[in-house]
Amino acid sequence: MTYSASFPPSLDKLIHSPEYFLTNILADSRQLEFVKTEKALISEAAFIDGRTRLSVDGDRYLIDWDHLKEFQAAGQLVCDPARFIFHVSFCGSTLLARACTIPGRALCYKEPQALIALSTLRLENHPLYESGADWSLLKNVVLQKFNTPWQAGETTLLKPSNWVNCFLPELMECHPSSRAVLLIIEPEDFLIAVLRGGRERITYICNLLRQLQRAFPHYSGLIEQAAPLAADPWKSTARLILLVYEIQMAAFRKLMTQLPSGHCRVMSYNSLISRPEESLALASETLALGFDDAEVMRSVELNFARHSKNREENYDRKQARIIDQRISREYRDIIGEALDWHHSKCPEYQEPGQLADVEAVPWRAM
């Protein structure tokens, strides 16, 4: 083991204590990196992928791969069923993750870098992946770290980055009894959300498309068909954005066939916003969080009026709709052409309303 602290924790504590947060997988040096953190930092952060400082002491701790094998041989690494919020991006997933975080009852880890690294290693066919046994061990360690409660009676859940959608079916093979909520958005709304974010979001989506293409190579032909409109790059871009949407939906369709009945539910952004209490109750039921009516109502009151990324701001949904309407007008022809192309070229396409389980649990207002 390698430490940058004078009084390092034990290996057992690094592996099994939630206060030591797994920040990254250093595959080339065959090490895992941890920092000491606090529950409040995890809970408040919009993302735990390196953008937010989580260390409370400035130190980092590295575990060599061979030590993990020793733990595995001793039977000290157990991968229990996990709970996930998977999403296509720009669809309210951070809001749902915050609503599912209730002190003492449930804590959601939002987009940990270790899962992003795991996905990248898989798509790169890194030697760790090709080794088989080492890869299985790595998946177990990562999922166990994010499945360790901070206190008795608390449940943990994960909202991975949608970068992880590149290997969803394989990730869930680690424990087939896991549970998942799949949060989606209408294709037109997804396209508008990406265009609204400008160059930064478009660049992210293009990078994600390259990752998705490696995981779903049978979409390469459609990607080639969408790309060559040099005379009108905006039309090509809009088509490619919708292909990112469609490939993620294909990953979700496959995932739904893997999990047991009742362990997976598709939820739309529109239902989350228009019926927040029902949606949170459905998420609680699917993820086996056990929230009662009072907890659901209190969480909705605390979270749905605030900006999910910046907790200091209230969220103005009326203003957000005005901006979306402006984007829709400005890019009307491009959006319309891209949607027509998407419908005609994606034979497996299903409207989110068809894919989603739209039945709501009875909601008892208190």
Image (cartoon, rainbow, N blue to C red):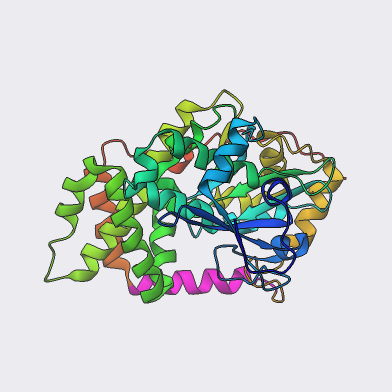
Q: Quadrant of the N terminus?
A: bottom right
Please say whether residue 47 is visible from this viewpoint. yes
Is 18 included in the stretch rendered in magenta? no
| Residue 156 on image: x %, y % | 70, 45
Q: Is residue 248 visible?
A: no
Q: Is residue 223 above or below residue 285?
A: below
The residue at the far top in this view is: 261
Q: Is residue 279 left or right of residue 214?
A: right
In the picture, the quarter occupied by the C terminus is: top right
Rendered location of residue 123, percent (x, y): 34, 48
In the rendered image, residue 161, in percent from the top left (x then y), is placed at 50, 55
Stretch of the chain drawn in magenta? 314-330
Side of 1 where 205 appears, left or right:
left
Q: Height in image: 148 above or below 55?
A: above
Identify which residue, 156 or 290, lies in the foreground.
156
Q: Residue at x 59, y 31 (%)?
A: 73
Check the image and report above or below for 291 versus 94.
above
